[in-house]
Amino acid sequence: MNDNPLLESWWVNENTGQVSCAEHGGGYLNAAVRGLPTLTEHITPLGTWIQITPDYQAEFLKQVDASSMGELCQDGTRKDEHR
């Protein structure tokens, strides 16, 4: 587990719609979250990333079959395995 819980939070890129944890969302997102950990929105060269709140994430997972999402982090783990 990370010492920074925001690294495990989900983030959505407003430009692309990509959803990822900060740890696997690429270098720009990872550096932004580590550098300014209290912000819930980060503007990077690849787009604006907005934190998905834990309440929204829980509600989303209730309504969607996470196993059918097919969304993987860059290391090959499923995003829903980070919680």
Image (cartoon, grey):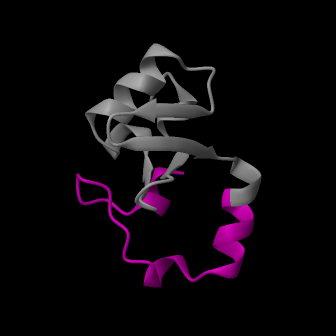
Q: Which residues are magenta?
A: 57-83
Quick one: 72 or 77, which is closer to the camera?
72
Extreme top residue here? 35
- Residue at the spot 52% in from the left edge and 24% down from the top edge: 4
x, y percent for residue 38: 63, 20
Left or right placement of residue 56 versus residue 32 in this view: right
- Residue at the spot 55% in from the left edge and 20% down from the top edge: 37
Corner quadrant of residue 40: top right
Quick one: 83 or 41, which is closer to the camera?
41
Is 40 one of the magenta-colored residues? no
| Res. 66 visible in picture | yes
Asked if residue 17 is positioned above or below residue 8 in the image, the reply reads below
- Residue at the spot 36% in from the left edge and 38% down from the top edge: 23
x, y percent for residue 28: 32, 31
Is 58 one of the magenta-colored residues? yes
Corner quadrant of residue 18: bottom left
| Res. 1 visible in picture | no
In this figure, what is the number of numbered marks?
A: 0
Extreme left residue here? 75
x, y percent for residue 76: 24, 60
Asked if residue 22 is positioned above or below residue 38 in the image, the reply reads below
x, y percent for residue 78: 37, 63
- Residue at the spot 52% in from the left edge and 76% down from the top edge: 66
Corner quadrant of residue 71: bottom left
**Image quadrant in which the N terminus is located:** top left
Left or right placement of residue 59 versus residue 14 in this view: right
